[in-house]
Structures are given as C-alpha cells and as structure tokens.
Amino acid sequence: MHSRKARLAALWLSVLPGVACADTGVYWTFVNNTPQDVHLVLGDIHHLECWMPSTFRQDNLLPAGQSRTFYLETGCTDMAFTVKLHGAGYDGSRVRIWSGDANPLYAAVTRHVHWAYSAKPLWKPSPRAIGSSSEDLDTAIGFTGRGWYDTIEASVQIAPGHTPLPPGSYTTSCNADYDASSGLLRTDCMTPRDVMQHEQDMNYKHLCKPGTNVRNDNGRPVCDEFSDAVPPGSYRDSCTLRDFDPRDGKLHVDCLDEWGREQCARELNYTHLCAPGSPVVNADGQPLCEQLSDELPQGSYLDSCTPVDFDPQEGLLSATCPDHTGKGADARLETYYRCAPGSTLSNDDGTLRCDTLFIPEGSYTSQCSDIRYADGVLQASCRTLSPLGTLRLDYEQTCAPRSTVRLDNATLRLACDTPKPG
C-alpha cells in the first residue's frame, strides 16, 4: 500500500481511477493550454518487463484547454521511457516520481522539440535533474513554451542510489549523476544552441577543489576552481579535463588541435614524464610537459617523438614517433634491457633505438667469452675446469632490470644475481 503522503499526491494529481499502484511509479501530468488537441503516444521503454505500459493507454487524446495525469508503474529501477506528443500547441508537462522503497531514486527529464514553427518567441528549457530524498521522490519539474510544435519528445530516466550532486549552476542545463566513492560526475549537458552533449564525464573529486562549484561550459562540466594537485599550464584553455588521479599521476584530457578539431581521450603520465611542478601545454591536440623529468631517457628522439609514458622502475618507454613519411606510430622500448646505462635514444624511422646497446655485466665475464646479447637473451662460451660450450640465459624474462650475472658452478649455468620479481 502507498503511504498517506503518496495517496495525497495521487489525489492532488487526479490519477485515473482504477490504476493499480506499485512500489515505484511515475505520475506525468500533461497540460494543453492551447485551442488544439494533442495526442500522447508512449514511445520506447527500456526493460519492458519491469514497466506496465497498460497503465498508460496508447494514443491518449489530450483535448484543448485540459490537463490529464497518467501513471506508469514498475517493479524495477534503472530504467527509461519516452512519451511523444503529436499535435500542435502543447504547452506544458509536470513529472513526479514516487517510490515506496526506503532507498532514494534519481530521475532526470529531458525534452526535445523535433520541429517547430511560430511567429512567437520559443523558450525551450534545458534538461534538469529531479532531486531525491530519503523517503520518496516528490519534486515537480515544469515545462512551458510558446509556439506551435509538430512533435515533442520527452524522456524520463530513473536510477537507484542517487548521491547528492556537486554544487553549481550546471544542474540547470545538465542531466547528472555522481558516484561519491570514485568521484566520477556523469553528465549530459546542453550547449547554448540547445544541442545535447552526451557522456561529458569528469572526476570531480580529483579535479576540483572540495566544495567548489561546477558550471556548464558549452556543454561540458568545468570546475570553477581546480585542485592544487592538478597540473598547471596553458592546456587548460583549450583542453577539457576529464581526470587526474594523483595515485598514478595520469592526466586525461580532450584537446583541440590547431584546426579546432577535438582530439579525445588523450593521456599524459605527468608524474613520470614531467619535472615536478612543470606546466603542461597543448601541442596540436596532445598534452605535453614544458619541462621533462630528469629520469626520462635523453637523446635526439625527443626532437621528433612525443613521449607518452615512462616507468622508471621497469624502464619501459612509450612514445609516438614519426617514420620517413611523417606518419606517427606507437613505439615502445625496454630501455633497462636494451640500452646501456646513460645511453641516449634516437628515432629510427618510427622505431626507438638505443645509441649504446646494453650487455649484462657480472662475474661471469671472467669465465666466459664470445658474449652476445640480443632481444633480451644472453649467450656466452664459458668454462670451468673444462669447456662448457655455449650457455644461454633468457635475461629479460628471468633477471631484474640491470641485474648482474654469474656462472653458477653448482648447476654450470648462467644465473641472475637479482631474479625478476614475481
């Protein structure tokens, strides 16, 4: 049974008689303040088995100058449905969500005018989130307009476990949801030209100062004040910040290139590649450090390659390097297993190369000759009291970076002084 509050809400909204009530429901009141009739048609319903569309009769006529309230009931959450209004002159709607569950729900309403013609000014409201409470969702949102519409499509999305949203003016023009544990703010935001920008997500906890407001900047959520941990630099003027996690040091952005085209999902490992406190710049759609870390391998490759990541513990360098045609290619190099300590690097037709090659050191050199090292494998001709022939060690797979090597007299094999962890 519904609570007394819900029953009063139903009476206030003049719900159609005979409509059954469920644990979760949507009351939608349509208002036609014009001299023409409007037809209401139920559109797409996700998770149809959860809804009871019979509670919303198809092709309901909304006569001129009247209002009617319809109720859709459901046994599930995390769903969406659409109502399409066919006819001229529709002028308003109001949505109310009620749930008998103690857990709060989150709901968002959007409206799209597919085609309109009018000599009168047209006001098209932006999407707005409906708030939630610990008891039920009982907040109305109204749409009004001026003009003659051919088709209007209004959508309601319902999801469980809504967390209070970060503050800011974006809530008046964005549908939003917030995961407090991860800090991810998910939004669909409207541009000044009434174009919906979908999946404009950012990590509020990592990017924004605690409690700072968020605004809608041309369809994207932006912090009024960034966290002190976020890398500084002019890239902020032409890049949309998505995330910066101080734990792994990776900066995630979408940046405009020199032609004004957006380069999405660009990543910069700020902690590994940049000197502490170095500003970041937008170089034709790619975020780059103004000052590189001292740990990053040096060399002529930096004149043509863009470092993407470097692991100072493993020595793995990733970069984008152009070949002889100028086309950039992904290049990777295990510097600790390929390059001599302190060796510079160069770009060899899109491939990273060591200017001085690495050969493992260690006590084995006093008993072995004809030492060869290629592709991470060490080979040498060794002897004790008698020749042992050519011995082979898969150095890269078994030895820690830069480990020295010995000749194990017990096994008569080459062995790492420091085995590879794990």
Image (cartoon, helix red, strand yellow):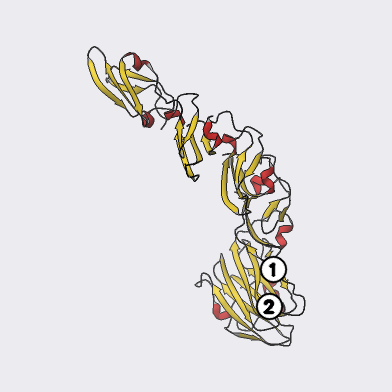
Q: Which of marks 1 and 2 is in front?
A: 2
Q: Position of residue 91 (x, y in %)?
A: 72, 79
Quadrant in which residue 188 is drawn: bottom right
Q: Can residue 172 be seen from the camera position used here?
A: yes
Task: Identify the secondary structure beneath mark 1.
Answer: loop
Say which residue label 2 marks.
Answer: 116
Q: Is 148 left or right of 405, judged from the image as shown? A: right
Q: Is 402 left or right of 253, judged from the image as shown? A: left
Q: CA separation, marks 1 and 2?
A: 31 Å
* Residue drawn where x is 58% and y is 74% of the image: 73
Mark 2: which amino acid? Ala
Mark 1: which amino acid? Asp
Say which residue label 1 marks.
Answer: 138
* Residue drawn where x is 60% and y is 38% of the image: 270
Front in this rendered view, residue 180 or 63: 63
Q: Is 339 left or right of 283, judged from the image as shown? A: left
Q: Where is residue 119 in the image (x, y as percent from the top left)?
A: 76, 80
Q: Can residue 3 be seen from the camera position used here?
A: no
Front in this rendered view, residue 49 or 275: 275
Q: In this view, does 112 lie above or below 416?
A: below
Front in this rendered view, residue 245 or 300: 300
- Label 1, residues with CA under 10 Å away: few <14, some 14-19, many ≥20: some
